[in-house]
Image: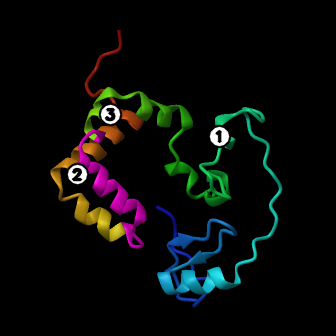
Amino acid sequence: MRAPRPCGVCGAAGAAQYRCPRCAAAYCSVPCCRTHKERCAPEPRPEPERAGGPGCPVEQRAGGPWSVEDILTDEDEQDRVPLHRLRLLGESEELRALLLNPHLRQLLQTLDQAEDKSSLMKKYMQEPLFVEFADCCLGIVEPPEKENVLPE
């Protein structure tokens, strides 16, 4: 768990739990985000060298002006899921079957568009279908370690 930072807009101590995707400035709320957006002038960042070279899929951006490297800090690195594990999500037949459910797709779309994702996520974790989806995703990217298994 990362240590809370002071908000770069209002200065509230230990309240900044969000980061600007353009300049990585910390802020604590939607009003502070809006204020920051009005005056955000990101400093140019040098392009980091990537292990896979120029054709590496890590560099592919989904139409946005930022990449994962732009918003992750060293503190966040421990929570990062490796790309090869994320690819397993696209290969899962169980996950594909779940995503055929229109109700689940609507929940995910609403969550994606919500301003307060955290509280909506807490609400959705009471929905059995959403919990099944989350468990399926976690089981794929973070398989449970085998307990009480003797080495062969």
Q: Which one is earlier in the sequence, the residue at label 3 or at label 2?
A: 3
Residue underneath mark 1: 58
Residue 36 visible (yes or no): yes
Residue 29 visible (yes or no): no
**Above or below: residue 14 compared with residue 72:** below
Q: Nearer the viewer, residue 23 or 150?
A: 23
Q: Is residue 42 left or right of residue 141?
A: right
Q: Which one is earlier in the sequence, the residue at label 3 or at label 1?
A: 1
Q: Is residue 55 left or right of residue 18?
A: right
Tell me the element at label 3.
helix
Where in the figure is residue 13, as x and y percent of width and height? Answer: 53, 86
Q: Is residue 86 left or right of residue 138?
A: right
Is residue 112 rendered magenta in the image? yes
Q: CA distance from mark 3 to mark 2?
A: 14 Å
Where in the figure is residue 124, as x and y percent of width and height? Answer: 24, 60
Which residue type does callout 2 highlight? His
Which residue type does callout 3 highlight? Arg
Residue underneath mark 2: 103
> Any mark on residue 96, and which?
3
- Disc 3, disc 2: CB below 8 Å? no
- Disc 1, disc 2: CB below 8 Å? no
Which residue type does callout 1 highlight? Val
Q: Nearer the viewer, residue 87 or 75?
A: 87
Tell me the element at label 2.
helix
Tell me the element at label 1.
helix
